[in-house]
Amino acid sequence: MAVDSSQETKASGLNTLVDTIISPKEAFEALAVSPTWGWACLVAIVLLLGGYALQRPAQLHAAVGTLQHMMATNSLFASMSDEQKQRAIESASHPSALQTAFGVFGVIVSLFFAALINSVVLLIANIAGRGRADFGRLWAASMNIAIPTFGLNYVVLGVICLAVGADHFQNTGDLLRSVPGLATLLPGTRGALAGFLMGINVFTLWGFGLNVAMMRIMARVSGAVAWIFPLLILLGGACIFAGTSRFYGG
């Protein structure tokens, strides 16, 4: 990770991540000059892990429900004996320390993967729109954007899980649906449509708006390109949820 070396730069990094939330124009103007992301990465990881810990009891309860649903509906489980199914359910409800460690590691990896995909897609947009950004600036901005898009998303969902209790979530789809968004407004939807709607919530829409602002302010890309590529990122994420909905009881 590119860790900022001076106290002045560190302060600038902290100001930038706060501005990304409350004053995006100032944040992206600053990132155009000084593409800092070390503090943003650290804060995003802390928020993700904090949210993950808050969600954990609900995740385990939902995972058991999801697994039971898949055993009843998915032909891949038809060859499993009752004993094997019971062992799988026990493993889902009481994961080992290694499984928990992999879960934590996966959360952190997802942050870097999402920032990378966001940076690459917007780099293509920058080239198409003859913008002024480079990969380093787009990466720094993407990592700052990850704080509201991923970090605050995880924390809010964690708070919701605490408020309603783990027993409220019958499957992982219920868990994802509880994040305020289109799926919350249309709770009766199921299948791929439900998964797609889960991918469009207040945080992914926030990320969409920040990506548009990033392209217009930092990359100086104008016209439809500044909107189309961020929209592709938003809809692409929703399509991933739609395509995997059968695995979490969407």
Image (cartoon, rainbow, N blue to C red):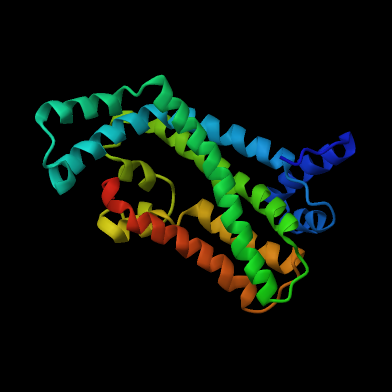
Question: Where's residue 56, x and y in %?
Answer: 41, 29
**Left or right of 12 in this view: 69:** left
Q: Is residue 185 visible?
A: no
Residue in the picture at 53% in, 51% down: 203
Based on the displayed image, in which of its 4 quarters is residue 185 positioned? bottom left
Which sits in the foreground, 207 or 241?
241
Q: Front-most of 92 and 175?
A: 92
Q: Is residue 33 visible?
A: yes
**Horizontal relation, residue 126 to residue 230: left or right:** right
**Image coordinates for residue 13, horizontal then vertical, percent:** 78, 42
At x 66%, y 65%, the residue is 123
Residue at position x 61%, y 32% in the image: 46
Count of numbered circles in the view: 0
- Residue 166: x percent and y percent? 33, 29
- Measuring 38% from the left and 58% from the top, which residue is drawn there? 197
- Give how far across and how far down residue 138 sits, in percent: 70, 58
136, above or below 125, in the image: above
| Quadrant into which the N terminus falls | top right
Q: Is residue 193 left or right of residue 10?
A: left
Q: Quadrant of residue 48?
A: top right
- Give the farthest residue toward the front: 79
Q: Nearer the viewer, residue 106 or 193?
A: 106
Which residue in the rendered view is the most extreme toward the bottom? Answer: 223
Q: Nearer the viewer, residue 122 or 182?
A: 122
